[in-house]
């Protein structure tokens, strides 16, 4: 691995995209459908073009995986995973929770990541082995050791709804914790775990561009991630659980019970 300051590049580009997103946000963007409920806006495309152009100019030999398809496939050890606008549904409805996520993977492992929330001017960033930061302040996961002391987040992908089983997990976690937030940006949810604002986050069906930067933040802030059954998580894998580390085993045990059909709290019928 070479000595380039990849993180600064990712941070600068993510910050540059902020005003572009905000301009579209103020104007109310035109929405198109990629699937039945899967939205894309002119802002997603404009932001992605800018990010990909900047990365291509700076690192012409690197691969880029970008959500809206503008990436480049090269034979490289370095792969950028780019979500130009994470939280598109929020953005389209003017619900204020979205971010740009830019992560770099070297030989399969995240080494640099930036997630920028332009509405709050919050820049979350992390470099492998060098810690995670929010606007220059070092981040550390929360110290809560039990689920019943914790606040959690999850998400529901816009596609594959008929296969979605997360509602079972949602209900069981809601019965055992301070509650669950579903704010609509997986990248920001992961940053919230890194920042100690949440004890854990899980989702079924995320993509590499949603999570590459956020997972490095969680790890560098002292947290832990894996699949939802206690195994390792591969980028782009189906199930993801990221926590402050302390509640990880408790959550995996709960999730294994749910997968096995052992529901600790039966859903009451609607009467
Ligand atoms: C979505 C958000 C959302 C998550 C979905 C993602 P997008 O990304 O991260 O929180 O629940 O699974 O697809 O489409 O807004 O970039
Ligand atoms: Ca996304
Ligand atoms: Ca997106």
Image (cartoon, rainbow, N blue to C red):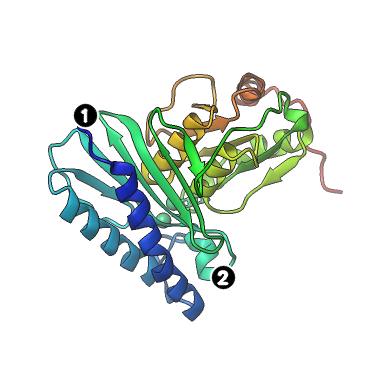
In which quadrant will I find the N terminus? Answer: top left
Q: Is residue 66 above or below residue 167?
A: below
Q: Nearer the viewer, residue 264 or 72?
A: 72
Mark sitting earlier along the chain (1/2) = 1
**In the image, the residue with mark 2 has its CB under 8 Å from the nearest atom of ligand 1:** no
Residue 242 lies in what quarter of the image? Answer: top right
Classify residue 50 as left or right of residue 201.
left
**SS at mark 2 in the image:** loop
Residue at 66% from the left image edge and 36% from the top image edge: 168
Residue at 18% from the left image edge and 52% from the top image edge: 58
Viewer-nearest of discs 1 and 2: 1
Classify residue 84 as left or right of residue 256.
left
Q: Nearer the viewer, residue 249 or 2?
A: 2
Q: Residues within 10 Å of mark 1 (few under 14, many from 20)?
A: few
Residue denoted by label 1 = 1
Alpha carbon separation for disc pair 1 and 2: 41 Å
Residue denoted by label 2 = 94
User: Which mark, residue 132?
Assistant: none
């Amino acid at each position: 691995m070479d000595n380039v300051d990849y993180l600064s590049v990712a941070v600068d580009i993510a910050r540059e995209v902020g005003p572009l997103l905000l301009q579209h946000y103020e104007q109310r963007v035109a929405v198109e459908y990629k699937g039945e409920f899967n939205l894309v806006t002119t802002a997603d495309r404009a932001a992605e073009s800018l990010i990909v152009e900047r990365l291509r100019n700076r690192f012409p030999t690197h691969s880029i995986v970008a959500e809206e398809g503008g990436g480049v496939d090269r034979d490289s050890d370095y792969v950028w995973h780019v979500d130009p606008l994470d939280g598109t549904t929020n953005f389209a409805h003017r619900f204020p929770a979205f971010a740009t996520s830019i992560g770099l993977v070297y030989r399969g492992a995240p080494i640099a990541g930036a997630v920028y929330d332009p509405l709050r001017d919050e820049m979350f960033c992390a470099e492998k082995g060098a810690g995670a930061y929010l606007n220059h302040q070092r981040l550390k996961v929360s110290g809560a050791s039990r689920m019943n002391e914790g606040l959690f987040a999850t998400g529901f992908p816009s596609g594959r709804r008929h296969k979605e089983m997360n509602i079972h997990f949602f209900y069981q976690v809601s019965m055992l914790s301070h509650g669950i937030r579903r704010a609509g940006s997986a990248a920001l949810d992961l940053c919230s775990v890194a920042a100690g604002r949440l004890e854990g986050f899980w989702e079924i069906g995320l993509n590499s561009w949603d999570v590459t930067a956020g997972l490095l933040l969680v790890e560098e802030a002292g947290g832990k991630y894996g699949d939802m059954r206690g195994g390792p998580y591969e980028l782009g894998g189906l199930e993801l659980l990221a926590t402050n580390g302390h509640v990880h085993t408790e959550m995996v045990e709960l999730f294994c019970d749910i997968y096995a059909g052992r529901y600790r709290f039966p859903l009451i019928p609607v009467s």
